Amino acid sequence: MTGKLECPFCKHVQEKEIPEDVCLPFYVCAKCGNKVMAQDKCCVFCQYGDKPCPMGHED
Ligand SMILES: [Zn+2]
Ligand SMILES: [Zn+2]
């Protein structure tokens, strides 16, 4: 499964594979090169993605 991630710095949207068994705490934006960290969510998909990760987090 892939999710769309929107960079908080440049608003660039990129698709990325969502890992099924680990949380992804950060990713590097393909456009601006900034390291995008998840702040108050478990991973970047829950924070910046169009769908949450499949880990079953409700909050
Ligand atoms: Zn960016
Ligand atoms: Zn998550």
Image (cartoon, rainbow, N blue to C red):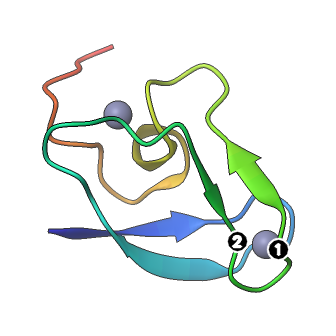
- Residue most toward the front? 22
Tag 1 residue:
33
Please name whichever residue, 45 or 24, is drawn nearer the observer in this view of the structure: 24
- Residue drawn at (43%, 43%) of the image: 24
Pinpoint residue 10: horizontal percent, then vertical percent. Answer: 84, 73
Q: Find out whether the residues at labels 2 and 1 contact each other: C-beta distance under 8 Å.
A: yes
Pinpoint residue 39: horizontal percent, then vertical percent. Answer: 67, 26
Q: Is residue 12 left or right of residue 21?
A: right
Mark 2 Cβ inside 8 Å of ligand 1: yes
Name the image quarter holding residue 16: bottom left
Q: Can you tell me which quadrant of the image ligand 1 is in?
A: bottom right
Quarter in which the C terminus is drawn: top left
Q: Is residue 57 left or right of residue 16?
A: left
Whether 41 is drawn above or below 43: the answer is above
Residue type at mark 1 is: Gly
- Tell me if mark 2 has few (under 14), some (14-19) or many (20+) residues whose alpha carbon lies within 10 angstroms of its own: many
Residue type at mark 2 is: Cys
Name the image quarter holding residue 37: top right
- Tell me if mark 1 has few (under 14), some (14-19) or many (20+) residues whose alpha carbon lies within 10 angstroms of its own: few
Mark 1 Cβ inside 8 Å of ligand 1: yes
Please name whichever residue, 48 or 18, is drawn nearer the observer in this view of the structure: 18
Pinpoint residue 34: horizontal percent, then vertical percent. Answer: 84, 63
Q: How many marks?
A: 2
Tag 2 residue:
29
The secondary structure type at the circle numbered 2 is loop
- Residue drawn at (86%, 79%) of the image: 32
The secondary structure type at the circle numbered 1 is loop
Whether 39 is drawn above or below 1: the answer is above
Instruction: Tell me how far mark 2 sits from mark 1, CA to CA.
Output: 5 Å
Quarter in which the N terminus is drawn: bottom left
- Residue drawn at (58%, 79%) of the image: 13
Name the image quarter holding residue 6: bottom right
